[in-house]
Amino acid sequence: MNIRIKALTLTLALLLLFSSVAVAQDVEITFLCYQDSVECDTYTDLLARFTEDTGIVVNVDVVPYVNIDEQLPIQVEAGEAPDIARITNFGIFAGEYLDASAYLDDDTVAYWSENYPAPILAAMTNDGGAGLGGYPDAFTVTGPYVNQTLFELAEVDMPDFETATWEDWTNATAMVQEALSSDEMTIYAIAVDRTGHRFAGPAMTMGATLIDDDGMFTVDTPGFRAMAELLNRWHEEDLTPREVWLGSGGGFAQAADFFINGQLALYMSGSWQVNRFASEVDGNFDWVVVPNPQGDGGSTGVAGGAAVVAFAQTEHPEEVAQVMAYLISEEVASEFAARTNSLSANSTVASAGVEYQVEDETILNALGVYALEVPKLQDQAAGLNVHPFAFAYYRNSADRITQYLIGELTLDEALAALQQDIDDAIAVASE
């Protein structure tokens, strides 16, 4: 009798196992993904292994960033969200995130919660509090690139990396420009992309308090003024390409091409450019990443980066939670960082060190410098990108600064107008 019961129990167990596998094989998860280099390609490969192990199919749909920025919010609002997406604007999807913690064991929830920055995790929840709606898959941090070859040709010494201010770098790069610029080739000293994001790091270094103690935006501070005045000096003295801030037609503009073409001594950008510069500079000159300059606010860039999130509209919440748990696991997160040459946002992975799969010393050195910038980030620099009202600052700051640069507004007027823009945008969003 006991033997018959055991046999029946085993048969039922096998039927349940095969049944669960069959169900898993019928589940297809859609992952809408954009990439700066090979992030989505890497996810495709990693998730193919997950499918082999679980039977859950994850279709990685690679799209341009504009689809994520402009079309995904419309899809989500229309009830047509993908199961998972790679995004950069967290606040816009508040109320739409899946809380994966409801479908995971306690150990996985604890690992997820403890290994990623709490403010960033909170930004991917529906109430800014508990829950696990996503995770940052890679950090970016802003910081300067320097054309080392231009300094050598101009016989100008670089300032001391550990003590140099933005004024020091301005003066040194101006000497490079003066020594090398000619009628045949214009060499520019220094540039920063036309965006409030890239502007914020130097401003905070100079002492700007962009986010006050109450978590609200304030722009009229001595540090913000100092950076605006320095940027104005760059234009008045023709140290920077005027096309970037003054000829962009009002949109985002970057100075990357000037750096790639060997025409720019110092370019304030960020870690996401490392792979691009290694590929496109291609040995035409030597370049290095240097620490963010010092100032009254210390030495800080601004953190950013993309995140992978799950949407509550999914028809397969348990399977989606399994996908997310797989992607945050130490082994997978470490391989993702290594293959994409990115700064891991997973503290366990970062502490253990990432074995980047690249032999290029320039890339390795650049990633090493950027990794050391992460612990130096001011709290406001780490939280800026995920602040629920960051859009209000980003949407208006570059335009108002440009109005000051072209003389349409005084600095006092530009800062007052920017503050009003931000306050009005927050008021509308809070209605």
Image: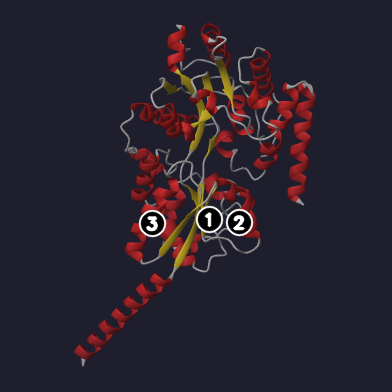
Q: Residues within 10 Å of mark 3 (few under 14, many from 20)?
A: many
- Tell me if 235 is positioned left or right of 334 in this view: right
Residue 280 in which image quadrant: top left
Q: Between marks 3 and 2, how big is the CA–CA gap?
A: 27 Å
User: In front of the other: label 1 or label 3?
Assistant: 3
Label 1 with label 2: CB-CB less than 8 Å: yes
Query: Which mark is on residue 47?
Result: 3
In the rendered image, the quadrant that contains the N terminus is bottom left
Q: Residues within 10 Å of mark 1 (few under 14, many from 20)?
A: many
Q: Secondary structure at mark 3?
A: helix
As displayed, is residue 310 above or below residue 408? below
Horizontal and vertical percent for residue 417?
A: 79, 31
Query: Which mark is on residue 126?
Result: 2
For the question of whether residue 382 can be seen, the reply is yes
- Tell me if 215 is positioned left or right of 49 in this view: right
As displayed, is residue 218 above or below residue 163? below
Residue most extreme to the left: 3
Residue most extreme to the bottom: 1
- Tell me if 161 is positioned left or right of 227 in this view: left
Going by the numbered disc 3, the residue's amino acid type is: Leu
User: In front of the other: label 3 or label 2?
Assistant: 3
**Mark closest to the chain's N terminus, 1 or 3:** 3
**Mark closest to the chain's N terminus, 3 or 2:** 3
The residue identified by callout 1 is: 133
Q: Residue at x 36, y 45 (%)?
A: 334
